[in-house]
Image (cartoon, grey):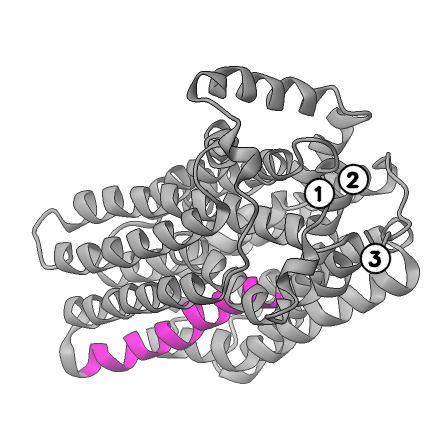
């Protein structure tokens, strides 16, 4: 498919890449991490939190099943704006459920709908990025794409969690989190209006020739052509196992930070957790993401990948050290988060660029990218579902040792992962 980058020249791509990927990151991070802190504050158990918040992430795995609809109906811009508006409304509804006796049941159901809208938004956003930028531009902006996607992690699990902790002291836990969910809602309504005005428009001519009756055939074609790609099974194994250890660590780390010291945790307040992620982690993460883009551009992805895998997985050792020593000061915890976030930002870029340039290329580029990122999510979702049960069983100290063991498959598949397409970056 030919890129439509010439149509974006009236607006610099960074002006919509930054906000588009920031918006993409918020639902994922909020469900995957922030909701856990909120539910922990409200007295929900670790095993219940991790199982349900991981299970509803399944939308990000299943999203390829409805990606052909986005290719056939309307435009990618339409789906970006519509899903952002819907997410804004859903967050407002979640805020209203929190004072109810059965708040967990109602709020987790609404979070499940947020997950569906977020997954749909991802398809449209990635399609916009892939179709409106050349290969060279994709490599140029991949670091910024990753930085702003994960800046959502910093703002959501950092700034807003810190603010929730401050509000808890004066408003109480329930009211504090109602306000935070309301802020999420307003943010997404504002993003919907901004992207309605700024996103590039695509050519509707191709969509106009497609009929509703083609959907089943289109979906079958997307799936079968995906699995006919050269070396696809090894590539699938790679994208699942690259983030396998992260799936365990990311669910438990904030709960470990908040758990009392008598239970093996660090006994941090909600504000402390937000401060650590928002202050110490933010600069490290953005720096890692941006530097990775230039690192890959200079060396090529194939030569860089094992270094990126190492940067992504080795820093999980900091959680094992924190669990063993249980420091009482915030400084060593902050240093640990800096190390982990820099590595996360640096290593994550390599995985996304591999999917974009080694798995997605072909006639169904947008749908195949969605399919691959959906499969990738299994590597985070499945370990996340059972992380709470495992940590309850063996304790935080042994759990983070297990996380380090879980990094080994990532190194093995990275050493042997095939490159089926040339890395030469074309202008068009």
- Distance from the alpha carbon under mark 2 to that under mark 1: 6 Å
- Distance from the alpha carbon under mark 3 to that under mark 2: 18 Å
Query: Mark 3 vs mark 2: which is more N-terminal?
Result: 3
- Where disc 1 sits, the SS reads helix
Label 3 crowding class (10 Å Cα cut-off): few <14, some 14-19, many 20+?
some
Task: Count the marks.
Answer: 3
Nearer to the camera, 142 or 403: 142
Label 1 crowding class (10 Å Cα cut-off): few <14, some 14-19, many 20+?
many
**Which quarter of the rendered picture does the N terminus lie within?**
top right
Residue under pointer 2: 358
- In contact (CB < 8 Å): disc 2 and disc 1: yes
Region of the chain picked out in magenta, as a range: 147-169
Query: Residue 129 placed where, x, y %?
Result: 62, 53
At a point 41% along the width and 77% down the height, the residue shown is 159
Residue 71 painted magenta: no
Residue under pointer 3: 307
At a point 52% along the width and 34% down the height, the residue shown is 207
Residue under pointer 1: 355
Residue 152 painted magenta: yes
Query: Residue 23 placed where, x, y %?
Result: 45, 61
Label 2 crowding class (10 Å Cα cut-off): few <14, some 14-19, many 20+?
many
- Where disc 3 sits, the SS reads helix
Nearer to the camera, 44 or 247: 247
Q: Kindly indicate the quadrant of the structure image that contains residue 308.
A: bottom right
- Distance from the alpha carbon under mark 1 to that under mark 3: 17 Å
Q: Is residue 272 above or below residue 40?
A: below
Q: Is residue 393 above or below residue 371?
A: below
Mark 3 vs mark 2: in front: 2
């Amino acid at each position: 498919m030919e890129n439509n980058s010439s149509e974006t020249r009236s607006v610099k791509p960074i002006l919509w890449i930054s906000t588009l990927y920031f918006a993409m990151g918020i639902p994922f991070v909020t469900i995957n991490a922030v909701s856990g802190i909120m539910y922990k504050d409200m007295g929900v158990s670790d095993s219940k939190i991790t199982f349900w918040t991981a299970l509803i992430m399944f939308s990000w795995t299943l999203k390829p099943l409805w990606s052909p609809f986005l290719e056939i109906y309307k435009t990618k811009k339409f789906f970006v704006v519509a899903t952002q508006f819907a997410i804004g409304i859903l967050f407002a509804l979640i805020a209203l459920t929190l004072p109810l006796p059965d708040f967990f049941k109602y709020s987790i159901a609404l979070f499940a709908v947020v997950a569906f809208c977020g997954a749909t938004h991802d398809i449209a956003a990635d399609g916009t990025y892939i179709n409106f930028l050349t290969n060279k531009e994709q490599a140029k902006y991949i670091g910024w794409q990753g930085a702003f996607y994960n800046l959502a992690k910093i703002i959501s699990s950092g700034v807003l969690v810190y603010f929730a902790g401050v509000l808890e002291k004066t408003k109480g836990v329930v009211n504090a989190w109602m306000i935070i969910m309301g802020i999420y809602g307003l943010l997404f309504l504002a993003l919907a209006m901004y992207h309605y005005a700024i996103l590039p428009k695509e050519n509707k001519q191709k969509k106009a020739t497609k009929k509703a009756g083609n959907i089943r055939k289109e979906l079958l074609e997307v799936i079968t052509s995906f699995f006919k790609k050269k070396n696809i099974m090894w590539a699938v194994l790679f994208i699942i196992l690259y983030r396998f250890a992260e799936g365990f660590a990311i669910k438990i780390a904030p709960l470990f930070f908040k758990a009392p010291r008598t239970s093996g945790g660090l006994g941090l307040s909600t504000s402390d957790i937000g401060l650590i992620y928002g202050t110490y982690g933010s600069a490290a993460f953005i720096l890692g993401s941006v530097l990775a883009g230039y690192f890959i551009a200079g060396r090529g992805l194939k030569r860089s990948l094992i270094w990126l895998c190492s940067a992504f997985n080795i820093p999980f050792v900091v959680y094992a050290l924190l669990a063993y020593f249980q420091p009482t000061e915030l400084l060593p915890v902050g240093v640990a988060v800096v190390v982990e976030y820099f590595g996360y930002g640096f290593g994550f870029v390599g995985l996304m660029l591999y999917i974009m340039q080694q798995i997605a290329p072909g006639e169904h580029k947008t749908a195949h990218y969605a399919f691959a990122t959906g499969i990738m999510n299994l590597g985070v979702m499945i370990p996340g579902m059972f992380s709470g049960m495992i940590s309850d069983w063996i304790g935080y100290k042994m759990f983070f040792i297990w996380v380090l063991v879980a990094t080994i498959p990532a190194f093995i598949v990275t050493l042997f992962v095939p490159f089926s397409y040339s890395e030469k970056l074309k202008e068009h």
